[in-house]
Image (spheres, rainbow, N blue to C red):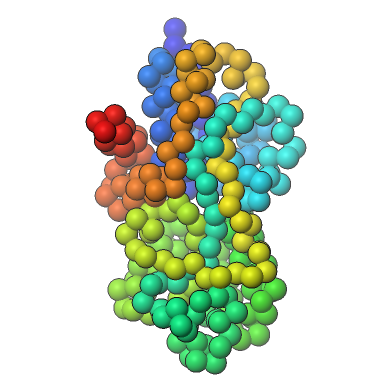
Amino acid sequence: MKKTLRIGHIDLSFHAASAALVCTVFEKYGWQVEMTASPHEEMFKRYGKGEVDMLVSAWLPASHDVYLAPYQDNTVKLTVLYHPYCIWGVPDYVPVSDVSSVEDLLRPDVLLKMEKRILGINPGAGISRFSRTMIEEYQLADSGYYFENGSESACYSTFEQAVSEQRWLVIPLWHPQFLHHRYTIRALEEPKGLLGGQDEATLIASKSITETFEPQLLAELQALSPGNTVISELDYLICRKNKTPGQAAEIWHQHHYQE
């Protein structure tokens, strides 16, 4: 009888890509994997209730530490899959001489060109929390800027449409993410340090389930660290090439083991 593992991931495409890579490792060792997704805070609550055995992934310490803290004592950190960080970015056709930092958004000449709505994703995301603070701390609202939560697809398609029309806009984003695989997005300097710095995307699991892992399986999990560029590529395959997370992971594995 196959051992069963319940993997939970945050309900965003690049988290699904990471989870698919983890899933392939377990399937290699004969495990049956049940995969589910939920928004950020909800997924951590489900993990804390024992509804999932493993969570892909916790961005620590800045973005998700507040969600993981209540369950820290029963958690094993298995590996760092990649090193995410949040940005406020602009398309590369926006001249760096005009806009190089968040503070430049308040320049009179920039105010004439830059769109005032800064569209993000769901409210529980770290970048959403950080962005709301940015609006306040840089006093951007006084000049008409505002942050708005939106769907993942709306955030990305709004950026792509703006690029196609060469419009100036700010996108609250992060690495890794599929837009970086296709576009050059310049991160704005952010002197107040409100975007959380670089996190570690950590594969976490309950202590009880890790005690059932075979030594070879555990070693392979601990060695799994695809990095930002790979996750951005997988995310691109999912979001713009219509691959399932499993198909994207399989494509990566084929290339990886051929090299």
Q: Give the left or right position of residue 232, taking residue 197 as reference.
A: left
Left or right: residue 230 compared with residue 78: left
Left or right of 148 on screen, residue 24: left
Does 184 appear above or below 81? below
* 214 or 42, nearer to the observer: 214
Where residue 196 sits in the image (x, y, percent)?
Answer: 63, 57
- Position of residue 257 relative to residue 10, above or below, is above
Where residue 255 appears, x then y in whole percent? Answer: 26, 35
**Which residue is more in the foreground, 132 or 49?**
132
Q: Position of residue 25 (x, y in %)?
A: 41, 24
For the point 54% across and 92% down, the residue is 108
Q: In the rendered image, which quarter contains the N terminus?
A: top left
Image quadrant holding the C terminus, namely top left
* Image position, residue 54 (x, y; %): 56, 29
* For residue 254, above or below residue 212: below
Image quadrant assignment for residue 202: top right
Q: Residue at x 47, y 54 (%)?
A: 175
Residue at the image position 66 percent from the left and 64 percent from the top: 194
Q: Quadrant of residue 252?
A: top left
